């Protein structure tokens, strides 16, 4: 059963837990970077090969860190992080994938019909699509187990208001991307909104896998299918290759669709829907308790 336990006695204070976590995460990150560079035999941080191997190794390292922190130091169950599966997981996952595709299809059509993007070519490469899906899966797992699996769970467990916990983790999530190429105000706002949305999805479904799949679908569909940059980065060959006559707030420019005001408009109604679902779920849990 997936759950976020609040009843067990907290063994380590929140500030100490977060400090230990940051130290362990920093050490794990150094090990991950050095291991990746050793495997690829170069210092090209912008290569696709580096991004691919880094996503895999970083996911493994951060899982070990969180397992050590959560299960060994705090002596809490792994299922509390949402690392479990039920038949509802696949139902919810299917819905978020369909929703993600609809969002980007609408955004793509608006950009296309308004002349803010044009199609250069359509190319189908199963190898690139598969490798990009694998990379985005590991990348999503890395970010989600940190932001939603551990941090959001830990903040909620401390007794903080759920909505405040969502805002804090969404701010941290958007801040994690500030070093990405061509970041702008609109992209930071959209990353914050996506952080709120994915946090609501995690708390509502009580499953990390649903938020991982939502995050992976978000990156893969916008990048590998519709040809937008993903948080300012290019990776594998997309199905649709785009040309932008100008970089603006409609097409998102060099940051990708996440830098588009259209993305903002499309995100807001879904956030309202999931916040409403989460509110009802919290009220139901409080009544049961």
Image (cartoon, rainbow, N blue to C red):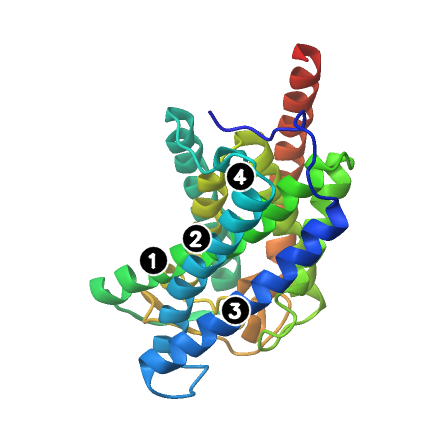
Q: Nearer the viewer, residue 200 or 271?
A: 200
Q: Nearer the viewer, mark 3 or mark 1?
A: 3
Q: Which residue is mark 4?
A: 81
CB contact under 8 Å: marks 2 and 1? yes
Question: Sequence order check: which comes first, mark 2 or mark 1?
Answer: 1
Question: Taking 284 as reference, is 25 above or below it?
Answer: below
Residue 34 seen by the camera:
yes
Q: Nearer the viewer, mark 4 or mark 2?
A: 4
Question: Sequence order check: which comes first, mark 1 or mark 4?
Answer: 4
Q: Which residue is mark 3?
A: 29
- Place residue 44 in its image quadrant: bottom left
Q: Nearer the viewer, residue 44 or 242?
A: 44
Distance between the alpha carbons at the discs numbered 1 and 4: 23 Å
Question: Sequence order check: which comes first, mark 4 or mark 2?
Answer: 4
Q: Nearer the viewer, mark 1 or mark 4?
A: 4
On residue 21, the disc is none
On residue 216, the disc is 2
Distance between the alpha carbons at the discs numbered 2 and 1: 8 Å
Counting other residues with Cα less than 10 Å from the Cα at mark 1, is it few (<14), some (14-19), or many (20 or more)? some
Distance between the alpha carbons at the discs numbered 4 and 3: 21 Å
Counting other residues with Cα less than 10 Å from the Cα at mark 3, is it few (<14), some (14-19), or many (20 or more)? some
Distance between the alpha carbons at the discs numbered 4 and 2: 18 Å
Question: Taking 198 as reference, is 223 above or below it?
Answer: below
Question: Sequence order check: which comes first, mark 3 or mark 1?
Answer: 3
On residue 133, the disc is 1
- Place residue 277 in its image quadrant: top right
């Amino acid at each position: 059963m997936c759950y976020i336990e609040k009843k067990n006695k907290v063994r380590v204070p929140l500030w100490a837990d977060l400090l230990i976590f940051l130290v362990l995460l920093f050490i794990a990150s150094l090990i991950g970077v050095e291991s990746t560079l050793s495997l690829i035999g170069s210092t090209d941080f912008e290569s696709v090969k580096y991004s691919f191997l880094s996503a895999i190794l970083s996911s493994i390292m951060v899982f070990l860190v969180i397992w050590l922190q959560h299960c060994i130091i705090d002596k809490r169950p792994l299922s509390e992080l949402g690392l479990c599966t039920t038949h509802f997981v696949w139902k919810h996952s299917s819905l978020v994938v369909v929703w993600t595709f609809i969002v980007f299809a609408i955004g793509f059509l608006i950009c296309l019909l308004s002349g803010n993007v044009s199609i250069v070519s359509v190319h189908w490469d199963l190898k690139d699509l598969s490798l990009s899906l694998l990379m985005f899966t590991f990348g999503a797992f890395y970010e989600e187990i940190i932001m939603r699996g551990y941090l959001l769970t830990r903040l909620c467990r401390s007794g903080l208001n759920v909505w405040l916990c969502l805002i804090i983790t969404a701010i941290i999530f958007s801040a994690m991307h500030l070093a990405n190429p061509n970041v702008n105000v609109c992209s930071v706002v959209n990353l914050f909104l996506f952080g709120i949305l994915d946090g609501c999805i995690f708390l509502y479904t009580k499953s990390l896998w649903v938020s991982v799949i939502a995050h992976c679908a978000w990156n893969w569909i916008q990048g590998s299918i519709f040809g937008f940059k993903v948080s300012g980065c290019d990776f594998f060959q997309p199905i649709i290759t785009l040309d932008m006559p100008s970089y603006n707030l409609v097409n998102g420019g060099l940051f990708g669709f996440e830098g588009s005001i259209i993305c903002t408009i499309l995100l807001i109604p879904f956030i309202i829907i999931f916040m409403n679902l989460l509110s009802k779920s919290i009220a139901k849990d409080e009544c049961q308790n």
